[in-house]
Image (cartoon, rainbow, N blue to C red):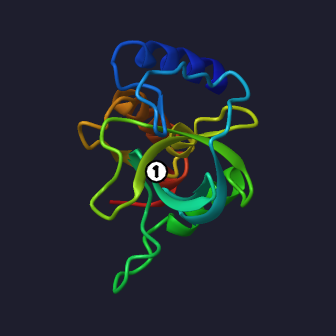
Amino acid sequence: MGRTLLVAAISMVAGGTACDGRLLGETTPTTVSAGGAVEANATVDFVIDGDTIDVVIDGREERVRLIGIDTPETKRPDAPIECYGPEATAFMQELLPVGTPVRIERDIVNRDDYGRLLGYVYRAADGIFVNYEMMRQGYAQTLSIGPNDLYAQLFADAAGAAERDDAGLWGRCSG
């Protein structure tokens, strides 16, 4: 169910705007495919937490904040670790172990206020859309910040399904 639904949803969402599917440094749209392997443009160097990774792109390290998702905090100074934060980090480490080739695609705004690259991340070997997978499996909630909202509806639908299924944080964390 998941992969077929994801491919159909991405195909429906990806068709219309000039900003969809742009690769790092590109200015023309590319086709987004979750049906199989995709061409890598980065390699995972470290998983910070459930929504932030370090990658190597053309020999330089970049911190990447996944667009559209928000996982419970585990690294905020002077704040407790939030419910399901360690599990979200562990799941991200499972999805993207160090050395994993990935494809990073951007939306309209390239960086956040902390200098992190903002991106949609796909695992190159099988095309898994990592942002979506974190949401659908219940490790993240939606965080839609325009204008980077190309997949906002897809993510909202995935979060709704995870909540209905009591998946991940939806079944374990209250409030």
Amino acid tagged 1: Ala
Answer with left or right where residue 132 lies relative to residue 146: right
**Position of 115 relative to 133 (above/below):** below
Q: Quadrant of residue 149?
A: top left
Q: Which part of the image, by quadrant, shows the N terminus?
A: top right
Total marks in image: 1
Horizontal and vertical percent for residue 84?
Answer: 51, 64
Which residue is pictured at 63% across the width and 25% down the height?
34
Please tell me in which quadrant of the rendered image residue 106 appears: top left
Vertical order, 70 against 81 (above or below):
above
Task: Look at 35% across and 27% down and name the residue there.
Answer: 153
Residue 13: % across, % down: 42, 18
Counting other residues with Cα less than 10 Å from the Cα at mark 1, is it few (<14), some (14-19), or many (20 or more)? many
Residue 145 appears in the figure: yes
Residue for badge 1:
140
Which element is circle 1 on? loop
Where residue 138 sits in the image (x, y, percent)? 52, 47
Give the residue at x 76% y 37%.
Answer: 125
| Residue farthest toward the left in the current orientation of the protein | 146
